[in-house]
Image (cartoon, grey):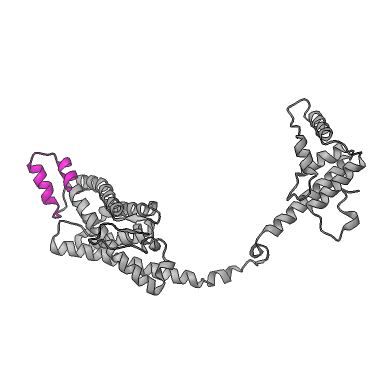
């Protein structure tokens, strides 16, 4: 019988077209039952099985498609219903279903890439000892960039502490790492950079780690939401956004932990506002917004210049291919007197 798992041709693999050919032969043997009649018979059988509940009667076109060659798969349940409608019993229907499932499984195995079908599972010891060369080439430059960024942040701390500047300059390395490597690399550099700042400013610098983390996240995610196209205007806006977010984090720390000032040169501006009759909260907020915007603009564009040097060095060493995000600035131009600037 056509549904008996290819008894006459066991050497040849079963296919969808062979099953369809056997269905056509079965229909012919049953007297070329019309497709509409097969659909009605299936509907009546399903209604009896549902005990009067809702049933789905297959359309005539669905039955017709089941007898069409060149298909990639068959509905095993529908095939079983069809052969029963053509006079086969339940046991024969189960045999037809098994054929459909076997052919489908074989097709899925053939569709899988050869690497998935044949590649042996490596032993754990081998995996633990083997590090791909491209991974090594990526890890070392990333670590190098992060270490350099931490040093840059520490240098900013030292410069401000020595020259008593009204800016902060403690997030240049954080900005570079967040933009070039990603936001969470920037967070790591922000934490380590602030830790170096405690060597200069003491433990007072530790609570402001939250400010630097916020800046790293805004720089990192902000750069990536622009895709691969960036203009000087959009970069300017990104730095201003970083400044405002940092202010929202810094002002509560200043008010709760330090009564509005830490001894930084920016405190002079706070005193000017309070002397004009403004409240302490308003004075701290205004002075921090002003100094933070100026600081993040200077920080952002210094970081941009350093990124260009990093990019040019990377083109000689292969760094752009190993560090995610660096390609975003591959065609960047350092700000100049030209009327338009863009990079991709």
- Report if residue 210 is visible in the image: no
Q: Nearer the viewer, residue 30 or 102?
A: 30
- Report if residue 340 is visible in the image: yes
- In the rendered image, residue 10, in percent from the top left (x then y), is placed at 87, 58
Residue at point 46%, 71% (across, down): 136
Q: Quadrant of residue 344?
A: bottom left
Q: Quadrant of residue 56?
A: top right
Residue at point 82%, 36% (across, down): 35
Taken as a whole, is the magenta stretch helix, strand or loop?
helix
Vertical arrangement, residue 154 with respect to residue 232, above or below: below
- Furthest toward the top, the residue is 52
The magenta region covers 263-288
In this rendering, would 131 be left or right of 251?
A: right
- Furthest toward the bottom, the residue is 316
In this rendering, would 315 be left or right of 170?
A: right
- In the rendered image, residue 26, in percent from the top left (x then y), is placed at 89, 44
Numbered label tally:
0
* Residue 276 sits inside the magenta stretch: yes
- In the rendered image, residue 252, in percent from the top left (x then y), is placed at 24, 45
Residue at point 71%, 58% (across, down): 109
């Amino acid at each position: 019988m056509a549904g008996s798992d290819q008894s006459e041709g066991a050497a040849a693999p079963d296919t969808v077209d062979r099953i369809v050919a056997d269905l056509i032969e079965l229909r012919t043997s049953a007297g070329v039952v019309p497709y509409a009649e097969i659909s009605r018979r299936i509907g009546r059988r399903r209604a009896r099985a549902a005990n009067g509940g809702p049933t789905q009667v297959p359309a005539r076109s669905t039955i017709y498609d089941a007898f069409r060659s060149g298909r990639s798969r068959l509905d095993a349940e529908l095939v079983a219903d069809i052969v029963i409608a053509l006079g086969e019993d339940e046991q024969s229907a189960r045999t037809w279903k098994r054929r459909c499932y076997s052919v489908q499984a074989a097709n899925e195995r053939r569709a899988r890439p050869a690497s998935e079908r044949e590649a042996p599972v490596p032993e754990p010891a081998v995996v633990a000892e083997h590090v791909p060369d491209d991974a090594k080439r990526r890890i070392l430059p990333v670590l190098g960039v992060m270490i350099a960024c931490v040093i840059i942040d520490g240098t900013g701390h030292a410069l401000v502490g020595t020259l008593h500047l009204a800016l902060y300059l403690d997030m240049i390395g954080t900005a570079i790492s967040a933009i070039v490597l990603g936001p969470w690399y920037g967070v790591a550099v922000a934490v380590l950079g602030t830790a170096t700042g405690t060597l200069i400013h003491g433990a007072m610098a530790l609570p402001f780690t939250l400010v630097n983390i916020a800046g790293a996240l805004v720089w990192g995610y902000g750069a990536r939401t622009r895709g691969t196209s960036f203009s000087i205007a959009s970069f300017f806006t990104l730095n201003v956004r970083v400044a405002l977010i940092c202010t929202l984090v810094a002002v509560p720390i200043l008010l709760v932990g330090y009564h509005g000032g830490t001894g930084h040169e920016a405190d002079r501006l706070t005193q000017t506002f309070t002397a004009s009759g403004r409240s302490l909260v308003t004075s701290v907020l205004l002075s921090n917004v002003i100094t933070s915007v100026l600081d993040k603009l200077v920080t952002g564009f210094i970081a941009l210049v350093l990124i260009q040097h990093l990019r040019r060095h990377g083109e000689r060493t292969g760094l752009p291919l190993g560090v995610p995000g660096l390609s975003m600035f591959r065609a960047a131009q350092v700000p100049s007197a030209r009327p338009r600037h863009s990079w991709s």
